[in-house]
Amino acid sequence: MVALASFLDARAASGQWLVRIEDIDTPRCAPGADQIILRQLMQLGMTWDGELWYQSNRLQAYEHAFKSLQKQGKVYPCACTRREIADSVVAAHGALPGGERPYPGTCRNGLPPDRKPKSWRFRVSSDTVHFQDRWCGEQSQCVEQQVGDFIVRRADGMWAYQLAVVVDDAAQGVTDVVRGQDLLSSTARQQLLAQALDASVPKVMHIPVVTDENGLKLSKQNSAPPINTDKPLITLTSAWQHLGLGPLSATSVEQFWTQATASWAGHFFDRRLAP
């Protein structure tokens, strides 16, 4: 559904729709998964613009950005394990909060004696980040209180999602990001990183995610069934209905994209596309 929304947003704005394969977490990437995704997009009539990017080919760019943050004193090594962080949160608050576990800053002023660094964290300030989400409205987050200094390089040496997407968005000249509301809480962190790297901050839209009867996001991690591309019009119409933007009368995939793009433009750009 996110692919549908982002594709419509780009087409309604007469912009470019970029596809990026976020395979930075290589141990969790199933061989051939990228080709399945690309084939499904094409079967649904969704063609991307420009070069297809793979994050696994961008490691030097992330290293360069990391060194820039190091020179600014914006990152520091951390020796803490997840268990140690959880214990610190419990000691400070009496229980573990739901969602994020704010990092207590244990290594902020230097590593404890005889400890070796595991990860690297971005040093945040106490300022509150404010931004306008095109779907959810006005948003704000004090990253220090809700997240704490966050990881940009993991203990296994891999680059964190937060850093990689900021670097790639800047390099690709991304102006608008459309994604699921499960990533809404990442926005403030990414904006702080973009500012530190002197990169432009894209506008954001976070759409509702599809969940099962237990409220879990439908995903491969939760054993959700794959989308059916044998009947693309049914699949596209179902995704559109989940967005709740009104009925369409399309009887073909081509009609669906024409009607859905015009409807999206009317909702989010205060105009209709020219016929």
Image (cartoon, rainbow, N blue to C red):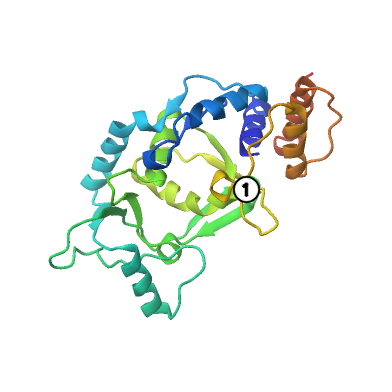
Q: Position of residue 53 (x, y in %)?
A: 44, 26
The residue at the far left in this view is 114
Quarter of the image with the N terminus is top right
Q: Position of residue 75 (x, y in %)?
A: 27, 52
User: What amino acid is labelled 1 in the image?
Assistant: Leu
**Left or right of 225 on screen, residue 84:** left
Q: Which residue appears at 36% of the width and 79% of the height?
A: 91
Which residue lies under the disc numbered 1?
A: 218
Disc 1 crowd rating (10 Å Cα; few below 14, some 14-19, many 20+) is some
Res 261 seen here? yes
Q: Which residue appears at 31% of the width and 37% of the height?
A: 62
Work out whether residue 269 or residue 151 is closer to the camera in this orientation and state it.
151
Q: Which corner quadrant of the image does residue 48 belong to?
A: top right
Q: Which corner quadrant of the image does residue 257 belong to?
A: top right
Q: Which residue appears at 66% of the width and 35% of the height?
A: 227
Q: Which residue appears at 28% of the width and 42% of the height?
A: 66
Q: Position of residue 72 (x, y in %)?
A: 24, 48
Numbered disc 1: secondary structure? loop
Res 272 seen here? no
Q: Which corner quadrant of the image does residue 65 belong to?
A: top left
Q: How many marks?
A: 1
Q: Position of residue 122 (x, y in %)?
A: 32, 53
